[in-house]
Amino acid sequence: SQELEQSPQSLIVQEGKNLTINCTSSKTLYGLYWYKQKYGEGLIFLMMLQKGGEEKSHEKITAKLDEKKQQSSLHITASQPSHAGIYLCGAVSLSGNTPLVFGKGTRLSVIA
Amino acid sequence: DAGVIQSPRHEVTEMGQEVTLRCKPISGHNSLFWYRQTMMRGLELLIYFNNNVPIDDSGMPEDRFSAKMPNASFSTLKIQPSEPRDSAVYFCASSPTGKNTEAFFGQGTRLTVV
Protein backbone atom coordinates (compact mmCIF):
# COMPACT_ATOMS: atom_id res chain seq x y z
CA SER A 1 0.00 0.00 0.00
CA GLN A 2 1.07 3.54 -0.58
CA GLU A 3 2.68 5.45 2.25
CA LEU A 4 3.42 9.14 2.50
CA GLU A 5 6.16 10.54 4.68
CA GLN A 6 6.18 14.21 5.54
CA SER A 7 9.09 16.25 6.78
CA PRO A 8 9.64 17.95 9.01
CA GLN A 9 7.10 16.73 11.55
CA SER A 10 6.97 20.17 13.08
CA LEU A 11 8.35 23.57 12.25
CA ILE A 12 8.62 26.86 14.07
CA VAL A 13 9.44 29.89 11.97
CA GLN A 14 9.59 33.59 12.56
CA GLU A 15 6.99 35.70 10.84
CA GLY A 16 8.20 36.82 7.44
CA LYS A 17 10.48 33.85 6.87
CA ASN A 18 10.13 31.34 4.05
CA LEU A 19 9.68 27.63 4.67
CA THR A 20 9.34 24.33 2.83
CA ILE A 21 7.47 21.16 3.73
CA ASN A 22 8.17 17.92 1.90
CA CYS A 23 6.02 14.90 1.13
CA THR A 24 7.63 11.70 -0.15
CA SER A 25 5.68 8.76 -1.47
CA SER A 26 6.62 5.09 -1.43
CA LYS A 27 5.01 4.74 -4.86
CA THR A 28 4.39 6.86 -7.94
CA LEU A 29 1.96 9.66 -7.27
CA TYR A 30 -1.02 9.95 -9.59
CA GLY A 31 -2.56 12.82 -7.74
CA LEU A 32 -1.14 14.71 -4.81
CA TYR A 33 -3.31 16.88 -2.59
CA TRP A 34 -2.30 19.44 -0.02
CA TYR A 35 -4.65 20.25 2.82
CA LYS A 36 -4.37 22.56 5.80
CA GLN A 37 -5.91 21.87 9.18
CA LYS A 38 -6.33 24.25 12.06
CA TYR A 39 -6.50 22.78 15.54
CA GLY A 40 -9.92 21.34 16.28
CA GLU A 41 -11.18 21.89 12.76
CA GLY A 42 -11.56 19.99 9.55
CA LEU A 43 -9.21 19.90 6.60
CA ILE A 44 -9.22 22.71 4.08
CA PHE A 45 -8.19 21.91 0.51
CA LEU A 46 -5.24 23.95 -0.76
CA MET A 47 -4.33 22.50 -4.14
CA MET A 48 -3.92 19.35 -6.20
CA LEU A 49 -1.01 18.35 -8.42
CA GLN A 50 -1.17 15.69 -11.05
CA LYS A 51 1.53 16.05 -13.64
CA GLY A 52 5.24 15.60 -13.10
CA GLY A 53 6.88 19.00 -12.82
CA GLU A 54 3.56 20.72 -12.19
CA GLU A 55 3.62 23.75 -9.93
CA LYS A 56 0.67 25.63 -8.50
CA SER A 57 0.38 28.72 -6.37
CA HIS A 58 -2.29 30.15 -4.16
CA GLU A 59 -1.52 33.46 -2.53
CA LYS A 60 1.85 32.91 -0.85
CA ILE A 61 1.75 29.12 -0.97
CA THR A 62 3.38 27.21 -3.84
CA ALA A 63 3.35 23.46 -4.32
CA LYS A 64 5.31 21.39 -6.78
CA LEU A 65 5.31 17.76 -7.86
CA ASP A 66 8.70 16.51 -8.95
CA GLU A 67 9.31 14.99 -12.39
CA LYS A 68 9.47 11.44 -11.09
CA LYS A 69 6.18 12.00 -9.29
CA GLN A 70 7.26 10.59 -5.99
CA GLN A 71 7.79 13.77 -4.04
CA SER A 72 6.02 17.04 -3.54
CA SER A 73 7.06 20.19 -1.76
CA LEU A 74 4.98 22.99 -0.31
CA HIS A 75 6.67 26.37 -0.02
CA ILE A 76 5.37 29.33 1.93
CA THR A 77 6.84 32.73 1.22
CA ALA A 78 6.94 35.45 3.88
CA SER A 79 5.06 33.38 6.46
CA GLN A 80 2.32 34.96 8.54
CA PRO A 81 0.55 33.86 11.73
CA SER A 82 -2.43 32.89 9.57
CA HIS A 83 -0.30 30.19 7.96
CA ALA A 84 -0.01 28.33 11.25
CA GLY A 85 -1.63 24.91 11.35
CA ILE A 86 -1.09 21.35 10.24
CA TYR A 87 -0.29 20.71 6.61
CA LEU A 88 -1.17 17.29 5.24
CA CYS A 89 -0.40 15.75 1.92
CA GLY A 90 -2.73 13.13 0.48
CA ALA A 91 -2.43 10.82 -2.50
CA VAL A 92 -4.73 8.83 -4.72
CA SER A 93 -4.14 5.61 -6.56
CA LEU A 94 -3.76 5.11 -10.28
CA SER A 95 -7.50 5.13 -10.82
CA GLY A 96 -7.73 8.55 -9.29
CA ASN A 97 -11.06 8.03 -7.67
CA THR A 98 -10.24 6.11 -4.55
CA PRO A 99 -9.93 7.77 -1.18
CA LEU A 100 -6.92 9.76 -0.17
CA VAL A 101 -4.12 8.24 1.84
CA PHE A 102 -2.55 10.92 4.01
CA GLY A 103 0.82 11.64 5.51
CA LYS A 104 0.97 12.30 9.24
CA GLY A 105 1.19 16.03 8.73
CA THR A 106 3.59 18.86 9.46
CA ARG A 107 2.71 21.16 12.34
CA LEU A 108 3.66 24.75 11.53
CA SER A 109 3.93 27.50 14.10
CA VAL A 110 4.65 31.08 13.09
CA ILE A 111 5.94 33.38 15.80
CA ALA A 112 6.00 37.16 15.73
CA ASP B 1 -24.18 24.72 0.63
CA ALA B 2 -23.32 24.31 4.31
CA GLY B 3 -20.60 21.79 3.59
CA VAL B 4 -20.22 18.41 5.22
CA ILE B 5 -22.04 18.42 8.53
CA GLN B 6 -21.03 16.15 11.38
CA SER B 7 -22.66 15.65 14.73
CA PRO B 8 -21.99 15.75 17.53
CA ARG B 9 -18.85 17.93 17.56
CA HIS B 10 -17.78 16.46 20.88
CA GLU B 11 -18.72 13.23 22.57
CA VAL B 12 -17.61 11.94 25.94
CA THR B 13 -18.75 8.47 26.87
CA GLU B 14 -17.94 5.71 29.27
CA MET B 15 -16.18 2.58 28.19
CA GLY B 16 -18.63 -0.05 27.04
CA GLN B 17 -21.26 2.39 25.83
CA GLU B 18 -22.48 2.61 22.27
CA VAL B 19 -21.45 5.67 20.30
CA THR B 20 -23.04 6.88 17.06
CA LEU B 21 -21.44 9.53 14.91
CA ARG B 22 -23.44 11.19 12.16
CA CYS B 23 -22.59 12.78 8.84
CA LYS B 24 -24.50 14.68 6.20
CA PRO B 25 -22.46 14.94 2.98
CA ILE B 26 -22.64 17.76 0.50
CA SER B 27 -25.67 17.40 -1.73
CA GLY B 28 -24.79 15.79 -5.04
CA HIS B 29 -21.61 14.16 -3.83
CA ASN B 30 -21.53 10.45 -4.60
CA SER B 31 -18.62 9.38 -2.42
CA LEU B 32 -18.43 9.51 1.36
CA PHE B 33 -15.44 8.70 3.55
CA TRP B 34 -14.93 8.16 7.25
CA TYR B 35 -11.48 8.92 8.66
CA ARG B 36 -10.01 8.72 12.14
CA GLN B 37 -7.24 11.03 13.31
CA THR B 38 -4.89 10.41 16.22
CA MET B 39 -1.53 11.85 17.14
CA MET B 40 0.17 8.50 16.79
CA ARG B 41 -1.30 7.27 13.53
CA GLY B 42 -2.36 10.45 11.79
CA LEU B 43 -5.38 10.41 9.48
CA GLU B 44 -6.55 6.90 8.68
CA LEU B 45 -9.28 5.89 6.27
CA LEU B 46 -11.86 3.67 7.95
CA ILE B 47 -14.42 3.08 5.22
CA TYR B 48 -15.79 4.69 2.12
CA PHE B 49 -19.05 4.55 0.24
CA ASN B 50 -19.82 5.16 -3.39
CA ASN B 51 -23.46 5.79 -4.27
CA ASN B 52 -24.42 4.64 -0.77
CA VAL B 53 -22.67 1.29 -1.19
CA PRO B 54 -19.69 0.40 1.02
CA ILE B 55 -16.72 -0.11 -1.26
CA ASP B 56 -13.82 -0.70 1.09
CA ASP B 57 -14.08 -1.24 4.82
CA SER B 58 -10.64 -2.73 5.30
CA GLY B 59 -9.68 0.20 7.48
CA MET B 60 -12.35 -0.50 10.06
CA PRO B 61 -10.33 -1.57 13.08
CA GLU B 62 -12.61 -4.20 14.56
CA ASP B 63 -16.08 -5.69 14.52
CA ARG B 64 -16.99 -3.13 17.14
CA PHE B 65 -17.05 -0.55 14.35
CA SER B 66 -19.83 -0.41 11.80
CA ALA B 67 -20.92 2.17 9.25
CA LYS B 68 -24.08 2.66 7.27
CA MET B 69 -25.32 4.93 4.57
CA PRO B 70 -29.08 4.42 4.26
CA ASN B 71 -29.44 7.22 1.73
CA ALA B 72 -27.42 9.78 -0.19
CA SER B 73 -27.72 12.42 2.49
CA PHE B 74 -26.87 10.55 5.67
CA SER B 75 -24.27 8.22 7.10
CA THR B 76 -23.50 6.88 10.56
CA LEU B 77 -20.43 5.39 12.18
CA LYS B 78 -21.20 3.28 15.22
CA ILE B 79 -18.86 1.93 17.86
CA GLN B 80 -20.27 -0.75 20.14
CA PRO B 81 -18.91 -1.27 22.72
CA SER B 82 -16.58 1.71 22.90
CA GLU B 83 -13.11 1.49 24.43
CA PRO B 84 -10.64 4.17 25.60
CA ARG B 85 -8.37 3.46 22.64
CA ASP B 86 -11.17 4.59 20.32
CA SER B 87 -10.64 8.14 21.53
CA ALA B 88 -9.81 10.22 18.47
CA VAL B 89 -11.22 12.79 16.11
CA TYR B 90 -13.47 11.20 13.50
CA PHE B 91 -13.88 13.00 10.19
CA CYS B 92 -16.42 12.52 7.48
CA ALA B 93 -15.64 13.73 3.96
CA SER B 94 -17.50 13.69 0.68
CA SER B 95 -16.56 14.20 -2.94
CA PRO B 96 -18.25 14.21 -6.31
CA THR B 97 -17.70 11.30 -8.65
CA GLY B 98 -14.76 11.56 -11.00
CA LYS B 99 -11.03 11.34 -11.11
CA ASN B 100 -8.92 13.50 -8.90
CA THR B 101 -11.72 15.41 -7.32
CA GLU B 102 -11.04 16.98 -3.98
CA ALA B 103 -12.64 15.67 -0.83
CA PHE B 104 -14.52 18.12 1.38
CA PHE B 105 -14.16 17.48 5.09
CA GLY B 106 -16.54 18.06 7.95
CA GLN B 107 -15.43 19.68 11.19
CA GLY B 108 -14.98 16.33 12.87
CA THR B 109 -16.29 14.67 16.02
CA ARG B 110 -13.89 14.57 18.94
CA LEU B 111 -14.62 11.34 20.79
CA THR B 112 -13.35 10.69 24.29
CA VAL B 113 -13.98 7.32 25.88
CA VAL B 114 -13.28 7.24 29.60
Image: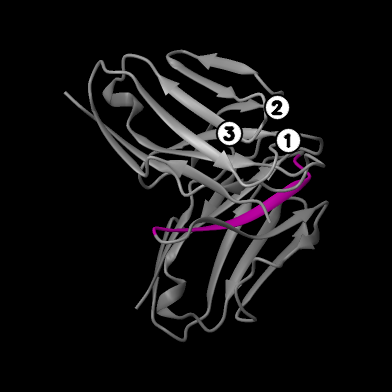
Indicate the amino acid at tag 2: Gln
Q: Which mark is residue B42?
A: none
Query: What's the residue at 67%, 29% (across, down)?
Result: A68
Q: Secondary structure at mark 2?
A: loop
Contact, CB < 8 Å: mark 2 with mark 1?
A: yes
Q: Which residue is mark 2?
A: A50
Tell which of A90 and B65 is nearer to you. Answer: A90
- The segment highlighted magenta reads B29-39
The C terminus of chain B appears in which quarter of the rendering?
Answer: bottom left
Toward the front, the furthest residue is: A68
Q: Quadrant of residue B26?
A: top right
- Give the chain of mark 3: A
Q: Earlier in the sequence, mark 3 or mark 1?
A: 1
Frontmost residue, B22 versus A48: A48
Is B54 a magenta residue?
Answer: no
Dot 1 surroundings within 10 Å: few (below 14), some, or many (20 or more)?
some
Which residue is under mark 1?
A30
Q: Position of residue B19 (x, y in %)?
A: 52, 74
Amino acid carrying label 3: it is Gln
For residue A61, above or below residue A105:
above
Rendering coords of residue A99 (x, y %)? 70, 48
C-alpha span from label 3 to label 1: 11 Å
Residue A50 lies left or right of residue A111; in this view the side is: right
The residue shown at (42%, 14%) is A60
Q: Is residue B34 magenta?
A: yes
Q: Which residue is mark 3?
A: A71
Horizontal and vertical percent position of residue A93: 74, 44
